[in-house]
Image (cartoon, rainbow, N blue to C red):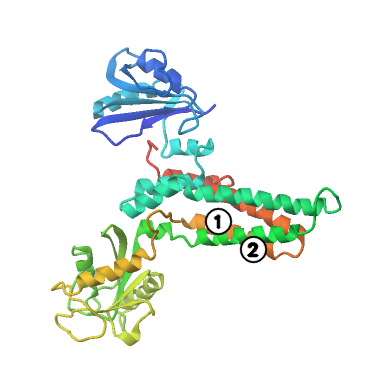
């Protein structure tokens, strides 16, 4: 039998209200003991005194609720105590619950893990909830909420149903092709048509933006030769002195990464060592190598060098220090006077919005993208096979890929790492 767990599921005290959640087979008995009364009617709030069963001392007056399983958020019997949110009250109630036999404090993410294990959430909804709890911008919140509410999961469930239907057609064609009651004419063409449609559906979903890019920020790399004004421009973009500014060439030796949100879009700005042909300084050479690595991983490059040395065709050519060096090619910008800063920010925002989910769209984590790509591989292989036996086997593997996407075939290590990132009350 599973342990019964409890934890504060609302914000840390002090607060107006502190919600303590109890989940597991002994949740009902625990509620009866601390309230001194029979269980309230399911899902109806009742005002009740809360006692320490060990001493009989009154601890608080709270609203209590009872949710019999399995139709609860965790799939188990669940009780909630809506107490006053002072530190002393919460500590006293938690201490009283911990003294009850069979009850213990929940581990990080354990409520959500039980919901997953009891089929109340799939792995994609769990990951969406994780991203929702970590969301710092409105874009992050919207995309994470769509994932947590099951928009991607509904696609997966539809793919599962279609795969089962196509698999049944393939098995019928293989097992009963000699039978008069199973028409064989045209069945392979119908299978191919269904697989073509599935390929299009999965490819469309794979085009969704990256959740890591949305969560961690659009990677903007400032690059160019020494003394081009990269550090000064970085400080102006993030609104603080994040990088050391000096007239001495080679001041920036290593990458400096600074997160910032601009108009609700998360960015990760990277200042890099100045790039030049030669250097006798071993540390500077390492810095330049790291700068080149940053350029390869960049979503947006702000190039503060000359036009014919653009590191990538899509790099934004910035004519920095326009107050001192006017007339150069590129977008004229002066971090000192503010000239062109608004225009540069708008160019970055336009680029960034093309890399992020639009309103009403979700974003895919790397795990989800890799899983969908494996699913697509098997569907494409099933479509390309000349033998229906191979087609049927690839369809079976595709259904296995579906199970990995939903978490039905996930490893314990992966689940441990995911749920460890949740707070204790989740």
- Res 393 → quadrant: bottom right
Query: Can residue 83 be seen in the rendering of this structure?
Result: yes
Query: Residue 356: where, in percent of width, then height?
Result: 38, 61
Residue 132 drawn at (x, y percent): 37, 47
User: On the rendered structure, is 214 left or right of 119?
Assistant: left
Give the image quarter of residue 190: bottom right
- Relative height, residue 85 to residue 149 (above, below): above
Question: Residue at point 38% right, 66% down?
Answer: 354
For the point 40% across and 69% down, the residue is 297
Give whichever of 9, 249 is nearer the camera.
Answer: 9
Of residues 345 and 103, which is closer to you in this image? 345
Please state which of the two labelled residues, at mark 2 or mark 1, is closer to the viewer.
Answer: 2
* Image quadrant where one finds the N terminus: top right
Q: Secondary structure at mark 1?
A: helix
Looking at the rendered structure, the secondary structure element under dot 2 is helix
Residue on which the image places disc 2: 380
Residue 237 point in image, percent of width and height: 22, 66
Q: Is residue 53 left or right of residue 236?
A: right
Q: How many marks?
A: 2
Residue holding disc 1: 371
As drawn, 297 above or below 250: above
């Amino acid at each position: 039998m599973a342990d019964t767990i409890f934890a504060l599921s609302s914000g840390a005290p002090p607060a107006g209200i502190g919600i303590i959640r109890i989940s597991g087979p002994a949740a009902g008995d625990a509620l009866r003991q601390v309230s001194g009364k029979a269980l309230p009617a399911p899902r109806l709030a009742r005002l009740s005194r809360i006692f320490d069963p060990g001493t009989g001392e009154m601890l608080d007056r709270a609203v209590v609720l009872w949710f019999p399983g399995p139709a609860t958020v965790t799939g188990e019997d669940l009780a909630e105590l809506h107490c006053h949110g002072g530190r002393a009250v919460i500590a006293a109630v938690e201490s009283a619950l911990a003294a009850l036999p069979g009850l213990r404090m929940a581990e990080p993410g354990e409520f959500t893990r039980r919901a997953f294990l009891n089929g109340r959430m799939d792995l994609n909804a769990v990951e969406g909830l994780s991203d929702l709890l970590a969301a710092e911008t409105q874009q992050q919140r919207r995309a994470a909420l769509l994932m947590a509410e099951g928009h991607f999961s509904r696609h997966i469930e539809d793919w599962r149903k279609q795969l089962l239907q196509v698999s049944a057609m393939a098995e019928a064609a293989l097992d009963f092709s000699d039978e008069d009651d199973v028409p064989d004419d045209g069945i392979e063409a119908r299978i191919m048509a269904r697989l073509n449609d599935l390929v299009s559906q999965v490819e469309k979903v794979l085009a969704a933006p990256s959740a890591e890019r949305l969560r961690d920020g659009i990677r903007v790399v400032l690059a160019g030769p020494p003394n081009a004004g990269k550090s000064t421009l970085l400080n102006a973009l993030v609104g603080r002195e994040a990088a050391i500014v000096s007239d001495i060439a080679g001041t920036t030796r290593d990458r400096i990464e600074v997160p910032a949100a601009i108009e609700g879009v998360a960015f990760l700005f990277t200042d890099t060592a100045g790039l030049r042909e030669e250097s006798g300084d071993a540390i500077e050479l390492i810095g330049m190598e790291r700068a080149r690595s940053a350029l390869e991983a960049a979503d947006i490059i702000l190039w503060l060098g000359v036009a014919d040395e653009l590191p990538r065709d899509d790099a934004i050519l910035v004519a920095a220090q326009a107050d001192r060096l006017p007339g150069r090619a590129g977008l004229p910008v002066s971090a000192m006077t503010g000239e062109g800063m608004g225009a540069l920010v708008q160019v970055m925002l336009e680029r960034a919005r093309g890399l992020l989910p639009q309103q009403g769209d979700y974003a895919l984590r790397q795990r989800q993208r890799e899983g969908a790509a494996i699913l697509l591989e098997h569907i494409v292989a099933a479509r390309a096979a000349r033998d229906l036996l191979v087609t049927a086997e690839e369809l079976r593997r595709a259904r296995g890929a579906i199970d990995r996407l939903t978490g039905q075939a996930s490893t314990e290590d992966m689940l441990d790492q995911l749920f460890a990132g949740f707070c204790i009350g989740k």
